[in-house]
């Protein structure tokens, strides 16, 4: 389902393939009473690729050049094709998949729910038992001695950032954190007595006052006596879309409308910011000039506040009224897992895409800076689409009793995930949701869409850039690794390995396998790696580690000597970082030998130089000394200092990787 390919125009890429095929799979459902195995039908098959516990990072800009999967061949009959590359897509049924490129904290492994229960998506480092039940966060800041090499009194979790998620007519830029805000800081709940259904929020068709959007109408939310939801979020345009005159806005008009207060129960472009977020930032995008956050001055495609603001998470035995699947009091407990119930928050914007996202490669970028001055910013080919400043997460609205938990800017080491999903209930769905693609085969349009399978998400590259300067704040980490000292994960994972693997997916350490062209692509850097110690070699365009028990990583550059055994229940490891003793002794002996030779050579050279100096002094005997002679002699006696070519302490050419 994944491979690489080159098109006729010499564009080469990695791809994830999605096919329409029926599979009947025996799965274990922990949310049935009692929990047990059941058969489930899957009508499509795709893939997920992830770097869990292999490559993680904290802070930086990740950039991916991607073509999204869509039914866009000339034979498909997709009506959007006639409108041009810059037209906003509208024929939803021709974009049936849910592609994603996203990141999650290394303490949770995607799709392994045992590892994410009470981990996802916490970004909470407070001990406030009167405000939030500390047992619901598996690694709590209230724990003085958490063990597993974890840091004392540090709240941990597996938060999530989505570089891009979803397909159809819009892409979602989002992050997920927890614990979520209590109800009085959220959108007004739908009142079913009005005839509203819970899904009315997605089309802003709710009749319940205040149920469509935060702060709409203004008067409904002012009654709370405090602000609601996350403040100061920033939205920018997708200017690759063709503009429309009916979408254009100006700051003066919108500012006046907000000052007067919105009286309607839904937003429109003449009374609300283009984002439909009345608490969003409307300041200048670059600090000066006329372009402003939240104002669609060009009339192009614009991100809007996502009505989905998070889910309520519960264990299978929970009877709390907010749990989506409450256990009936008369049903015995399954005791499948520890008890928990908590709200998580999704801070996100949905931005309309143009046809070019499905017919060509676009560059998607995400800047993530940890710390109090940090932010998460989504961009399309260098233009900002959405931004969540750190202060929006840290400085949340409060009532007089301060019942809203203070979270922190996401800072867990995160790994990268790429996948394509197909769902019967999300914003993008295939034909005949919940059934085989063609149904009874009588719909000619549906048959053309199904004939277009397999569909491909194509990825030209994914790159990470980090600022490695020495002027960063202490909480601005900018580091690579899945087990950093600031946020350890290794021993926790090893002690709970059964939660991160199953019979089909064992935890396995793999050395080498990175793509390469020459041997130097697969060994440690510097003079030692080029001349003395070769840790790997390039074999058939893939790195092969020469000392797999000592040097690992994709390019054989990670020094680690270990022995490990894995079963479905246990993982035992004895590790020491660095080369094995034999290699260490060999390298040390070589260094000592070269050092001795260097000292002898330097002493001999110094003696010869002294003899030459005496001869020179004898030739000038009896002459009056020059006032500069002492200086000249000093310089002559220290030739090695003059010839030294020391590197500056800061090598700025390496500040970005």
Image: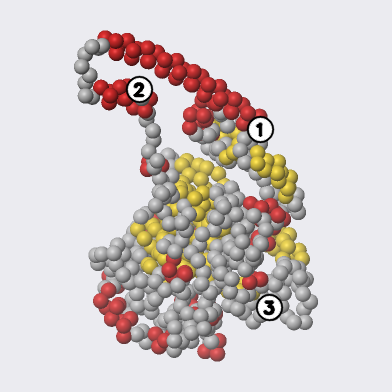
Q: Residue at x 66, y 80 (%)?
A: 320
SS class of the residue under badge 2?
helix
Q: Nearer the viewer, residue 535 or 652?
A: 652
Q: Give the side of residue 502 with respect to residue 19, left or right.
A: right
The residue that mark 2 highlights is 637
* N-term mark: 2 or 3: 3
Q: Nearer the viewer, mark 2 or mark 1?
A: 2
Are discs 2 and 1 less than 8 Å apart at CB?
no
SS class of the residue under badge 3?
loop
Q: Residue at x 57, y 56 (%)?
A: 487
* N-term mark: 2 or 1: 1
Residue 344 is situated, as x and y percent measured from the top left of the image, at 56, 71
The residue that mark 1 highlights is 581
The residue that mark 3 highlights is 326
17, above or below 520, in the image: below
Query: In which quadrant of the rendered image does the C terminus lie?
Result: top left
133, above or below 84, in the image: below
Q: Nearer the viewer, residue 41 or 538?
A: 538
Q: CA distance from mark 2 to mark 1?
A: 42 Å
215, above or below 166, in the image: below
């Amino acid at each position: 389902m994944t491979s690489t390919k080159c098109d006729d125009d010499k564009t080469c890429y990695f791809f994830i393939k999605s096919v329409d095929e029926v599979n009947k799979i025996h799965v274990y459902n922990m949310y049935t009473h009692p929990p047990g195995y059941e058969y489930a039908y899957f009508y499509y098959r795709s893939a997920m690729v992830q770097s869990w516990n292999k490559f993680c990072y904290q802070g930086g800009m990740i950039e991916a050049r991607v073509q999204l999967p869509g039914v866009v061949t000339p034979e498909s009959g997709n009506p959007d094709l006639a409108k041009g590359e810059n037209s906003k897509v509208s024929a939803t049924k021709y974009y049936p998949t849910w592609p994603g490129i996203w990141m999650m904290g290394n303490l949770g492994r995607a799709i392994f729910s045992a590892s994410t229960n009470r981990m996802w998506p916490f970004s909470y480092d407070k001990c406030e038992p009167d405000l939030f039940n500390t047992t619901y966060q598996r690694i709590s800041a209230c724990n003085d001695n958490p063990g597993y090499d974890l840091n004392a009194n540090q709240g941990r979790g597996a938060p999530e950032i989505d570089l891009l998620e979803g397909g159809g007519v819009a892409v979602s830029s989002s992050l997920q954190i927890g614990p979520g805000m209590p109800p009085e800081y959220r959108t007004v709940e739908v009142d079913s007595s009005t005839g509203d259904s819970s899904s009315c929020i997605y089309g802003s068709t709710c009749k319940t006052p205040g149920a469509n959007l935060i702060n709409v109408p203004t008067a409904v939310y002012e009654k709370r006596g405090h602000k609601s939801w996350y403040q100061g979020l920033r939205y920018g345009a997708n200017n690759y879309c063709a503009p429309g005159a009916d979408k254009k806005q100006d700051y003066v008009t919108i500012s006046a409308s907000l000052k007067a207060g919105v009286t309607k129960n839904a937003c429109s472009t003449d009374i609300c910011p283009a984002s439909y977020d009345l608490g969003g930032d409307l300041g200048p995008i670059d600090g000066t000039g006329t372009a402003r956050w939240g104002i669609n001055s060009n009339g192009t495609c614009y991100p809007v506040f996502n009505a989905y603001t998070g889910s309520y998470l519960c264990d299978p035995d929970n009877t709390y009224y907010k749990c989506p699947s409450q256990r009936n009091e008369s049903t015995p407990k399954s005791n499948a897992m520890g008890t928990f119930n908590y709200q998580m928050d999704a801070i996100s914007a949905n931005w309309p895409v143009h046809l070019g996202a499905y017919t060509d490669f676009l560059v998607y970028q995400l800047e993530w800076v940890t710390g109090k001055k940090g932010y998460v910013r989504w961009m399309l080919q260098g233009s900002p689409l959405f931004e969540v400043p750190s202060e929006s997460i840290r400085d949340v609205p409060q009532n007089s009793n301060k019942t809203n938990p203070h979270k922190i800017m996401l800072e867990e080491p995160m790994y990268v995930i790429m996948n394509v999903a197909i769902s019967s209930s999300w914003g993008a769905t295939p034909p005949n949701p919940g059934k085989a693609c063609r149904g009874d085969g009588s719909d000619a349009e549906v048959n053309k869409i199904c004939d277009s399978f397999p569909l491909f998400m194509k990825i030209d590259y994914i790159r990470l850039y980090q600022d490695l300067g020495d002027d960063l704040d202490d909480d601005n980490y900018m580091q690579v690794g899945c087990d950093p000292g600031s946020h350890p994960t290794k021993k926790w994972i090893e002690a709970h390995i059964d939660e991160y693997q199953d019979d089909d997916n064992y935890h396995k350490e793999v050395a080498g396998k990175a793509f390469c062209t020459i041997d130097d692509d697969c060994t440690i850097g510097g003079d030692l790696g080029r001349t003395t110690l070769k840790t790997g070699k390039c074999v058939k365009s893939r790195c092969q580690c020469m000392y797999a028990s000592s040097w690992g990583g994709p390019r054989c550059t990670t020094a680690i000597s270990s022995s490990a055994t894995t079963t479905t229940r246990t993982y035992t490891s004895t590790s020491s970082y660095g080369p094995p003793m034999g290699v260490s002794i060999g390298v040390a002996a070589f260094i000592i030998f070269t050092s001795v030779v260097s000292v002898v050579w330097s002493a001999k050279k110094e003696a010869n130089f002294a003899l030459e100096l005496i001869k020179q002094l004898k030739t000038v005997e009896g002459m009056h000394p020059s006032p500069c002679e002492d200086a000249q002699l000093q310089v002559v006696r220290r030739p090695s200092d003059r010839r030294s070519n020391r590197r500056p302490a800061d090598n700025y050419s390496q500040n970005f990787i």
